[in-house]
Amino acid sequence: MGAESNGSGAALLEDRLNVFALVIYIPGPLGAFLDDLRRELVPHYNPHAHVSVLPPRPLAVDWRTASEQVRASSQSWDAFEVELTCLDIFRVTEVIYLEVGAGARELRHMHEALNSDALAFQDPFPYHPHITLAQEVPHERVAEVFALARRRWEEFSGPRSFRAERAVFVQSTIRNVWLDLAEFPLGSVAIPGRER
């Protein structure tokens, strides 16, 4: 996903795109560090660190209908630990990202279970749990940005894992801002959507 936001600003209905995703936000000091790092690496982004369960996709139905599928599934998943390990680059897209170690199996299971029915989408690449740090970097700057990201990650002394306890259904806008539509605690009843 491009520029991320936690949906803190309202968007007109006509500003919203038919592009949705399901994400798990990274809380606490780790999330704050990753947001600051992403702003340093790619200053024009407004990040909200997350791992995508369902990468961006169009929907053929109303988002509320699709979110019911998430609600029904989320009740059967327990919260789990997600550990971030090393930096890497997707060679085709030159996206710089953090690899997910522990928790990758659970994320793949969630993706597999949800990428059907109202949420079905043929992803352009195989699903790979990760945290994007920089994308759309000019080719000639990728090595430099990657080196800076690796240095900052090595310097970080805080926790490198977080507990995935809730998933958030989000929608993109023409300004490349993502709005939170509904939150789903894992293993319990969904919190009603809070459309903005």
Image: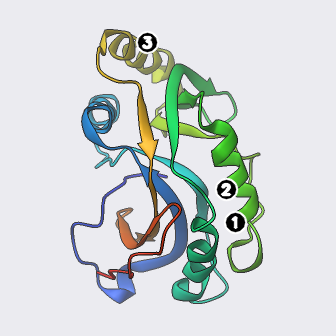
Q: Amino acid at mark 3?
A: Ala
Sooner in the amino-acid sequence: mark 3 or mark 2: 2
**Cα–Cα gap, marks 1 and 2:** 6 Å
| x, y percent for residue 52 | 54, 51
> Quarter holding the C terminus?
bottom left
Quarter assignment of residue 40 = top left
User: Callout 1: 10 Å neighbours few (<14), some, many (20+)?
Assistant: many
Tell us which disc is closer to us: 3 or 2: 2
Q: Is residue 111 left or right of residue 156?
A: right
Crowding near the residue tagged with mark 3, few <14, some 14–19, many ≥20 C-alpha atoms within 10 Å: few
Describe the element under mark 1 as helix, strand or loop: helix
CA separation, marks 3 and 1?
Answer: 35 Å
Disc on res. 147: 3
Badges 1 and 2: C-beta atoms under 8 Å apart? yes
Q: From what the image shows, is residue 168 above or below residue 53?
A: below
Visible residue check, residue 11? yes
Q: How is the image coloured?
A: rainbow
The amino acid type of the residue labelled 1 equals Leu
Q: Which residue is located at x 36 percent, y 69 percent? A: 179
Residue ID for mark 2 = 110
Vertical placement of residue 126 versus 111, above or below: above
Residue at the (46%, 18%) spot, across then down = 146
- Could you say whether the residue bearing mark 3 is in a helix, strand or loop? helix
Pointer 2 local density, CA inside 10 Å: few below 14, some 14–19, many at least 20? some
* Location of residue 144 (image quadrant): top left
The circle on residue 39 is: none
- Front residue of 55/162: it is 162
- Residue pointed to by mark 1: 114
